[in-house]
Image (tube, helix red, strand yellow):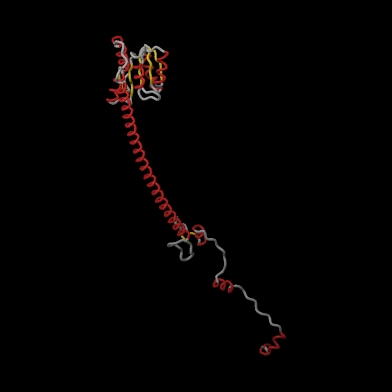
Amino acid sequence: MNILVVDDIATNRKLLRITLEAEGHDVLEAADGVEALQILDRETVDAVISDVLMPNMDGFRLCHEIRQSERLRALPFVIYTSTYNSPEDVKLAQTIGADKYLTKPAPAAAVLGALREVTETKAEWPARPAPAGHESYVLKQYSQALINKLEEKNSELQQSVEALQRAHERIVKLNGDLERRVRERTADLTNANRELNDALAEVKELRGILPICCCCKKIRDDTDYWHGVEGYISKHTEARFSHTYCPECLEKALAGLPTAAPEVSSSKALESGEGEDRLP
């Protein structure tokens, strides 16, 4: 058989093509109802399998147009949809003349079975008359189906918006918590750094008790090694030394130096009378 598959999603058309060609059928493809009607004008088709929700012309309208055509009125038509699946949608499909109604995703056996059913019973149908007296009723049902689907989509959209809003509020809260934790952690690090600097300053100032020899004045370190005062201070602080004398040490140092006796001339001695005292 020559089967026309109508669906705006290329992947869906490909899956049906593979299924039908595996059973020996030839497949034509259309992306919407307008393209499907163009193909039906120039090709001989044994059955149509159509989605409902499509741009330009949906599946309900396509079925209605086929049933209004004198040449195509008896063409077997299977609706295969995942969106229009309410009882009202099924009723509308029957009203406009669809022969079978399948809900996606259906097993391949169900699709092939529906196709076989509508094509085998076609020979038993008398020539279908054009629908008369119920055009306004069909359009009313069709409009109501579209309204219902629009309301359903609006409801889904509203739920999505609310979910996004909750997610946004959650992200804002998490960001606020993160900023607060960063501030707290920064403050902790600042305090720790200040305490470390204070500790280093205390070490450099050599605060505390130092073990020092009472005789030679050497200082013992943590490894039980004795250092001279200058060596220990240089190792543990940033201090530098300039050597000089304190007043007491300077006096002691000068006292230990030899002194020269003053020389007095004989003339000055006589004038002062010092020589007379030395006469026998």
Q: Which quadrant of the figure has residue 38?
A: top left
Quadrant (top left, top right, bottom left, bottom right) of the C terminus? bottom right
Nearest the viewer among 203 and 26 is 26
Height in image: 121 above or below 208? Answer: above
Q: Residue 53's x, y, as percent?
A: 36, 25
Quadrant (top left, top right, bottom left, bottom right) of the N terminus? top left
| Residue 227 falls left or right of residue 1 | right
Q: Residue 4's x, y, as percent?
A: 38, 16
Q: Residue 102's x, y, as percent?
A: 31, 20
Q: How many marks?
A: 0
Nearest the viewer among 248 and 163 is 163
Q: Residue furthest right?
A: 267
Nearest the viewer among 25 and 176 is 25
Please report the residue visible at 32 percent of the width from the left and 15 percent of the height from the top: 130
Q: Residue furthest front?
A: 133
Q: Residue furthest top?
A: 123
Q: Residue 46's x, y, as percent?
A: 36, 12
Height in image: 222 above or below 122? Answer: below
Height in image: 163 above or below 106? Answer: below
Q: Which quadrant of the figure has residue 270?
A: bottom right
Height in image: 266 above or below 91? Answer: below
